[in-house]
Amino acid sequence: MAAAPLPDYAVHLRPQDNVAVARRPIPAGTELRHDGHAVRVPAAVRMGHKFAVRPIGEGEPVSKYGQVIGFAARPVAVGEHVHVHNVKVGAFERDYAYASAIPAPLPPPAEERTFLGFDRGPGRPDHLRYGTRNYVAVISTVNCSASTSKYIADRVRESGVLKQYPNVDGVVAVTHRGGCAMQFDGPDHKQLDRTLAGFARHANVAAYILVGLGCEIVQANHLIEGEKLDVIQLGGAKGGPVVLNIQECGGIGKTVEAGVKAVAEVLPRVNDIRRVPVSAKHIILGTNCGGSDGNSGVTANPALGVASDLVVQQGGTTILGETPEIYGAEHILTRRAVSKAVGEKLVERIKWWEWYAGVFGAEINNNPSPGNKEGGLTTIYEKSLGAIAKAGTTAMVDVVRYAEPVTAKGFVVMDTPGYDPVSMTGIVAGGANVCVFTTGRGSVFGCKPAPSIKVATNTPLYRHMEGDMDIDAGKILDGVPVEEVGQEIFETVLRVAGGEKTKSEINGVGEEEFAPWGIGPTL
């Protein structure tokens, strides 16, 4: 039987790469033709996994995307499966070359696009003004008031009153496991305040109430004063935010009654807000990848990068998080930084993560997860090189801390952990009004109040979990151009921003996923 052309079975991303990625399962003994020579695959290779297209000597770099993803732990023969059994991480020099390759600005778009969104009015800065959803939030300051906050939201929903207010997307309880046993006004306290405030003043939240116990560290008055929440007031009402403390109200039952009453009072005003045409320059796109596989960096992430570029071209913003999944690829982004100072902000965060992981005796290469490795990802370098593709090709204009407001236009990095719920919580708190989440293994993540669009990296996953996936990027492996799928993602972003529900919203996912990052000890 004649050898099949390598593209029938695999993707060879760059001429200098010494591995190819299986675009579909490759049976043992398959003969392939590549660059004029035969490549025999002796053992079966699963979709998303790699095999050598050239001999790789022990200690030599393994190359994918034209970059180093690890080093051969032993000699690797042509056709051999390349994965954790024969690849190690190893250190290598990375020249940051700050601001040495700043991309030219994209040309003006052929058409200025719009979406039907909510304009909160000129009293808010732009990054807090234009929403894609219209929620009322019940925000718990501490875990001790989490159930009470949930009871308030549940009572409102169960009463059926929301049927009277068709312009209200719902009442969402923002609950978490923290809020106490931390240093008062310390790093964790300030970061949690910043995260809670980010949800309270989010462009997708028209009104909110704060619910506390009364004796916790994260006091509502500290949150309001420190984050200046009184500037963004409840539904435009005078007098500042509504604060309910269980101990002051006289227990859970009375607090729930007061909370339901407070929500009922603002619902008519929230319902008065209507969708209007809004420029696409007000899209703040949060990007994330979770449950990744070997094709994430081949299909969904590059396609999302195209969509990110289209958002930036319209004058909008795209956010890349998951700093531990930038590790090993940060030198590519520092070259794209608009200045040395911006590039140094990213490297400072990388160095901090090396220190932070070391404090706990951990290694950043503990990521990829077992599921990532099952899907074909071998090292953190490989995962990172695929992950940063979500950010497209434009200049990196800023690097911000976790849950900090994102005010810059263009491509921004936010320092978040790689754990999906924690990462996305920070990105949404920073102002993302719509999110795109790529997955190769099948993440079902949602994050109210921001809609979450799911993009599958491969078609078998999309078909298997079609009730949860919004877009199939696996068709790229069948020859559909990355640019075409990127355009599809961009068009979906605009439709979803205009009110079309995502699969996660249809399934009711997104309330339990609020997961603020705690960086310090629990005292």
Image (cartoon, grey):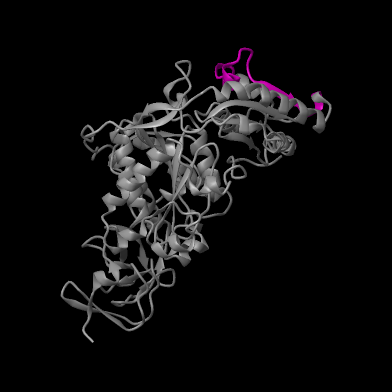
51 left or right of 150 in image: left
Percent across and percent down for residue 133 are: 50, 33
The residue positioned 56% from the left and 31% from the top of the image is 166
Give percent across and percent down for residue 363: 51, 55
Return the residue found at the far left. 36
Q: Is residue 205 left or right of residue 132?
A: right
Rendered position, 100 above or below 216: below
Using the image as rendered, state which of residue 175 and residue 208 is in the foreground.
208
Residue 338's quadrant in the figure? Answer: top left
Task: State the image quarter where residue 1 is shown.
Answer: bottom left
**With respect to residue 437, does 466 lie above or below?**
below
User: Residue placed at 41% from the left, 61% from the top?
Assistant: 89
**Image quarter in which the C terminus is found:** top right
Q: Which residue is at 71% across, 35% downward?
A: 159
Name the one closer to the observer, 392 or 129.
Answer: 129
Q: From this view, report whether residue 296 is shown above or below residue 185.
A: below
User: Can see residue 94?
Assistant: no
Front in this rendered view, residue 35 or 511: 511
The residue sitting at the bottom extreme is 1
Magenta residues, as a range? 226-248
Please, which residue is most extreme toward the right here?
Answer: 250
Q: Residue furthest front?
A: 164
Q: Quadrant of residue 28?
A: bottom left
| Magenta residue check for 145 | no
Q: How many marks?
A: 0
Place of residue 4 in the rendered image (x, y in percent of width and height, measured from the top left): 23, 78
Can residue 427 be seen by looking at this rendering? Answer: yes
247 magenta-colored: yes
Residue 318 rendering spot, x and y as whole percentages: 38, 37
